[in-house]
Amino acid sequence: MLPARHNGWMPDIFNDFFDNNWMDRPKATAPAINVIETPEAYELELAAPGMTKEDFNVHLDEEGDLVINMEKKAENKEGHKGHYLRREFSYTKFQQTMLLPEDADREAIEAKVENGVLTVNIPKIRKVEVEKAKKQIEVK
């Protein structure tokens, strides 16, 4: 069974527009990310419907930047009686690197997945601690 191309009342220009085989389609879709700043912390929210904590790897790289890896392997559903003509339900693989601000407390970052959203809490270093970290070194 194939989708109908002509329905009689809609001009062909609309059918041609919605039949987007002529457009290149990206192989992956990047999840939406929100970044919220409060006086105490930065909070990053990443939309991840259907993902579990096992699907994520959140870590700091060698430069101290936050790296979020997400990978979901496609499930083979037993008893499926056909093949997909089009399938866009899942992310295959995603990686995002976030440059952290100077006042981010890299030692206290926490992450959790709840209701299809990965939330990463990045506490801020208090201003006094930031000033100590910027200590001028005397050149001799």
Image: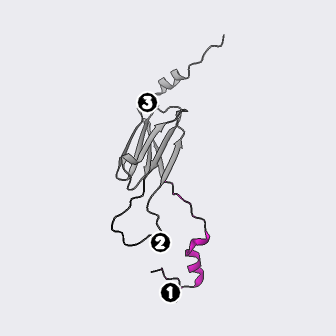
| Residue matched to label 3 | 107
Give yes or no for residue 20 being in the magenta stretch.
Answer: yes
Seen from the viewer's position, the closer of residues 40 and 59 is 59
Name the disc covering residue 15, or none: none
Which mark sits nearer the N-terminus, 1 or 2? Answer: 1
- Closer to us: mark 2 or mark 3? 2
State whether residue 105 appears in this view: no
Range drawn in magenta:
1-30
Which mark sits nearer the N-terminus, 2 or 3? Answer: 2
Which mark sits nearer the N-terminus, 1 or 3? Answer: 1
How far is the residue under mark 1 from the one under mark 3?
Answer: 60 Å
How far is the residue under mark 1 from the one under mark 2?
Answer: 20 Å
Q: Judging from the image, what secondary structure is the residue with disc 1 in?
A: loop
Q: Residue at x 51, y 21 (%)?
A: 132
Q: Judging from the image, what secondary structure is the residue with disc 3 in?
A: helix
User: Badge 3: few (under 14), some or many (20 or more) residues near its Cα, within 10 Å?
Assistant: few
Furthest-bottom residue in this view: 8
How far is the residue under mark 2 from the one under mark 3?
Answer: 47 Å
Q: Is residue 65 left or right of residue 43?
A: right
State which quarter of the image contains the C terminus. top right
Name the disc covering residue 7, or none: 1
Figure coloring: one colour
- Closer to us: mark 1 or mark 2? 2
